[in-house]
Structures are given as structure tokens and as C-alpha cells.
Image (spheres, rainbow, N blue to C red):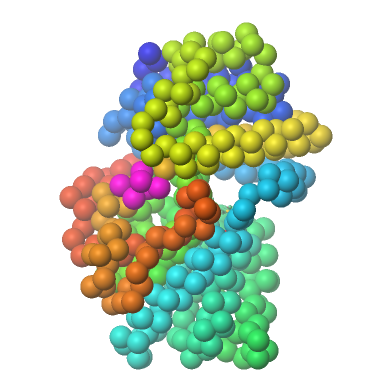
């Protein structure tokens, strides 16, 4: 089995994989886009010594991909997503994020009638998530609450940030025709930055609610949770909407995608032998109980990736994206949250002022569990490894 311990090892391995998949309409991209939970299946030996370097390189790889993406790339992906016929899409996730954020806010507002709220949207894109929160406020008729809220949107893409500010200016028209930003004063600030540097613009412990949709499957190590925990008030809540699949968890599953993307047999054999896999190994990956939803979800995800690959055949090579991402299973995300000092268990949350009356803090948006929205409170006690996390974050900043 390969042993990947250093950046040099990654560069060599990525070179092999990219050599094998060159010429495909949808190449893999760097293995450092895969969730750290699954990197050991690809020969990675993660340690305190190499994690910060790997994480910095991973962020760089993601940013390079976004820089390469042109309008034609995004339009082609959007069209392929529509054709894939998923029962839900990103806008469904945003609506659910909006609803749960407002349920939490209303509880906090009831407990303290004069409290002002600071809300932070991480990876705000062009503003759809915050727009869904404002819509949910309107649907509840909670205009007085809206006036007690200040929003900060954090987004690394300047173009997205610009679009967000413009679209949110007139957002949130309820049935009675109230306009949340014309008639009700809601303060919205944009910060052009990433989850790793947003604390520089925010006082620690300032956010009452941090919410984020469809962002964290681009972050392969959970160090972002250290930053977000620091940013939350003592009774603060983190709301995450995201996609959960395990399609990238094992080389055998990636070999299946390559096969469906039309890779030739010799190259497929090279890919498999690089990771000591044989044809049919995907069955071993799926062996075990309760795998039904995972198998269905991954099958749909594979079909979606291949659909994008086919659509990319019609656009110039330099505008094509790469398919590996940091998706993980929800149970892995939950484990990260618990380790990083968040309360995830609905019974334990019953005591929290924001959660009174909220029974299901994790909600399925997709029938097979591929899209979920969850609300998690900052635990009173910091995690045992909190200082380790801090050190790693400092190393990461230094490495970046
Ligand atoms: C799929 S979009 C989701 C946008 C929006 N939240 C929504 O659901 O409509 C992912 C967004 O995350 C942003 N993003 C990527 N990496 C980030 C990081 N490290 N910190 C903050 N935002 C990031 C991207 O620029 C992009 O706008």
C-alpha cells in the first residue's frame, strides 16, 4: 500500500492520478480534495506534523479550481444538475436553513426581549442563504425581530459578494407587501474572506447564530469548527445545511466513476493497481448493515458526476471542473462536531434556550439523507483538544 506522509508524496501521487485520468472530460483533481476521514483509504498517514501542510495545499487546490471556473462551467453544471432530476436542490436546503435559524432566533428573542442578535453567514455565495433567513422572518411576520438583527456575510469570491449585497437590498417581501430592507432596518455587512480569517473581522464570541449552506464539503479537515466555535456566543448555535455522500470514500468507488466516464481499460487497471484495488471491490466497500441509503445516494451522485462529465464534452477543456470533493457521511460530520465542542444530541439540546420546543435539530431535506440541515449548540466545555486545534490553526495560517 502507498504511504503518503509528506507534501512531496502528495505531489507524486497526484501526478500519477492526473496522468491516468488526463483526457477525461471530468478529471479527478487533487486527492487532497477528499475528506480527511477517507484519506487513509488512499494511503495517507495523517499526523500532527503533516496536517497543516496538507490542509493549506487542499485550500489552494480548491481555490485554483474556483478561479478556473468560468460562467460556462457553472452554467453547464447547473444544466446537468437539472437533468440529473434530483428530488431536491440547493434552494431546498437554503429554505430549511432559513426556517430553523428563525425558530432558534424566536426562542432566544422570547427569553430576552431586548437582546440584539448578530448572525454570520459563512460562504454566503450570492446571498441565497441569508435571503432564505429574511424570507422566513417575513413568513413568521417577525418584523420587530428583524430590526434586532445584524447580519455579516463572509464570502471569498468578490463577484458573489457583490451580487449578494445587490440582491439582499430589496429582499424579503411578505404577503402584505412589507419589504424587509426598505421598511425595516436590517443591517447587512459583507466581508470578503474565508472561514479561516473571518474572526479577524469579528470579536470572538460575537455571533449568536452562525449559519452556512453547502460550504463545508469543500473543507477536508474540521479545523473550521475551531474558528466557528470561537466566533459563537456562549449560548450560540451553528446551523449547517450540506450534502452528505460517501462517493469519494474509497478508490474502488472512484474507479467506478472513471469507468462510467469512459476511461480506457489499461488506465483503469493502472488506477486500481495504484491503490491495490480489484474490479468488484466496491461490493466490499458497501458490505455491512444499513447501507441502503448510502448505496442509493452514491449511485445518484455517480450518475450526476457522469452527467456533468458528458456535458463538459461540449465546452473548452480549460473551463472544465474536477470532480473530487470533501463530501462525507453525516455520522462523520457529527463526530467532528462533537470532538470540536458542539452539542449534537437533540435530548441534550432540550435544556438550551434556543432549542425550547424544537424537537428535530437535524432535518432531512432529501428522502435518502443526502441533504440535511442541522443546528448544533456550542458546548459549555471546550473540547479537550481545543488547544491542539488552536495550534493547528496557527500552523495552517503560517502554511497558507
Ligand atoms: C455552493 S456555494 C453556496 C452558496 C450559498 N451558501 C448558498 O447555499 O446559496 C459555496 C460557497 O462557499 C464559498 N466558500 C468556499 N470556500 C470558502 C471558505 N473557505 N470560507 C468561506 N466561504 C467559502 C464559495 O465561494 C461559494 O460561494
User: Residue 178's x, y, as percent?
Assistant: 64, 89
Quarter occupied by residue 361? bottom left
User: Residue 389's x, y, as percent?
Assistant: 28, 47
Residue furthest top as drawn: 266
Q: Is residue 224 visible?
A: yes
Q: Residue at x 68, y 65 (%)?
A: 163
The C terminus - image quarter: top left
User: Residue 175's x, y, as percent?
Assistant: 65, 86
Judge whether 33 appears above or below 279 on screen: below
The N terminus - image quarter: top left
Residue 26 is covered by the magenta coloring: no
Q: Residue at x 67, y 79 (%)?
A: 170
**Is residue 249 left or right of 135 when viewed as pictured?**
left
The quarter of the image that holds ligand 1 is bottom right
Judge whether 326 appears above or below 43 on screen: below
**Is residue 301 left or right of 223 when viewed as pictured?**
right
Q: Is residue 130 visible?
A: no
Judge whether 167 appears above or below 266 on screen: below
Viewer-closest of 309 and 12: 309
User: Main structural element of the magenta stretch: helix, strand or loop?
Assistant: helix
Which region is colored magenta? 330-335
Viewer-closest of 92 and 167: 92
Residue furthest right as drawn: 314
Q: Residue at x 57, y 89 (%)?
A: 184
Q: Residue at x 50, y 87 (%)?
A: 142
Judge whether 90 appears above or below 116 on screen: above
**Is residue 115 left or right of 157 when viewed as pictured?**
left
Viewer-closest of 225 and 366: 366
User: Residue 153's x, y, as percent?
Assistant: 52, 66
Amino acid at each position: 500500500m502507498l504511504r503518503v506522509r509528506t507534501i512531496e508524496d502528495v505531489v507524486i501521487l497526484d501526478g500519477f492520478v492526473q496522468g491516468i485520468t488526463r483526457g477525461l472530460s471530468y478529471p479527478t483533481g487533487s486527492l487532497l480534495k477528499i475528506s480527511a476521514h477517507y484519506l487513509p483509504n488512499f494511503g495517507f498517514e495523517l499526523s500532527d506534523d503533516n496536517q497543516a501542510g496538507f490542509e493549506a495545499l487542499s485550500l489552494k487546490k480548491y481555490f485554483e479550481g474556483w478561479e478556473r471556473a468560468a460562467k460556462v462551467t457553472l452554467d453547464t453544471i447547473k444544466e446537468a444538475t437539472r437533468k440529473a432530476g434530483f428530488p431536491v436542490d440547493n434552494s431546498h436546503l437554503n429554505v430549511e436553513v432559513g426556517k430553523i435559524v428563525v425558530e432558534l432566533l424566536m426562542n432566544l428573542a422570547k427569553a430576552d426581549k431586548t437582546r440584539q442578535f448578530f448572525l454570520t453567514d459563512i460562504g454566503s455565495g450570492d446571498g441565497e442563504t441569508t435571503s432564505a433567513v429574511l424570507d422566513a422572518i417575513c413568513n413568521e411576520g417577525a418584523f420587530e425581530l428583524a430590526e434586532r438583527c445584524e447580519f455579516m456575510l463572509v464570502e471569498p469570491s468578490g463577484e458573489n459578494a457583490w451580487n449578494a449585497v445587490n440582491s439582499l437590498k430589496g429582499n424579503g417581501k411578505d404577503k402584505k407587501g412589507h419589504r424587509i430592507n426598505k421598511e425595516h432596518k436590517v443591517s447587512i455587512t459583507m466581508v470578503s474572506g474565508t472561514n479561516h480569517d473571518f474572526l479577524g473581522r469579528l470579536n470572538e464570541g460575537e455571533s449568536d447564530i452562525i449559519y452556512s449552506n453547502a460550504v463545508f464539503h469543500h473543507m477536508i479537515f474540521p479545523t473550521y469548527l475551531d474558528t466557528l466555535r470561537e466566533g459563537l456566543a456562549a449560548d450560540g448555535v451553528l446551523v449547517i445545511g450540506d450534502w452528505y455522500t460517501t462517493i469519494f470514500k474509497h478508490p474502488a468507488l472512484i474507479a467506478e466513476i472513471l469507468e462510467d466516464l469512459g476511461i480506457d481499460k489499461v488506465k483503469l487497471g493502472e488506477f486500481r493497481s495504484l491503490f491495490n484495488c480489484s474490479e468488484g471491490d466496491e461490493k466490499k466497500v458497501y458490505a455491512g448493515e444499513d447501507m441502503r441509503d448510502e448505496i442509493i445516494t452514491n449511485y445518484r451522485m455517480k450518475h450526476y458526476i457522469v452527467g456533468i462529465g458528458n456535458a463538459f464534452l461540449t465546452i473548452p477543456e480549460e473551463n472544465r471542473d474536477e470532480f473530487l470533493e470533501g463530501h462525507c457521511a453525516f455520522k462523520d460530520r457529527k463526530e467532528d462536531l462533537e470532538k470540536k465542542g458542539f452539542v449534537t444530541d437533540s435530548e441534550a439540546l432540550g435544556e438550551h434556550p434556543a432549542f425550547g420546543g424544537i424537537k428535530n435539530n437535524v432535518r432531512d431535506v432529501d428522502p435518502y439523507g443526502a441533504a440535511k440541515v442541522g443546528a448544533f449548540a456550542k458546548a459549555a466545555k471546550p473540547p479537550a483538544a481545543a488547544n491542539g486545534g488552536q495550534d493547528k490553526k496557527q500552523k495552517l495560517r503560517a502554511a497558507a
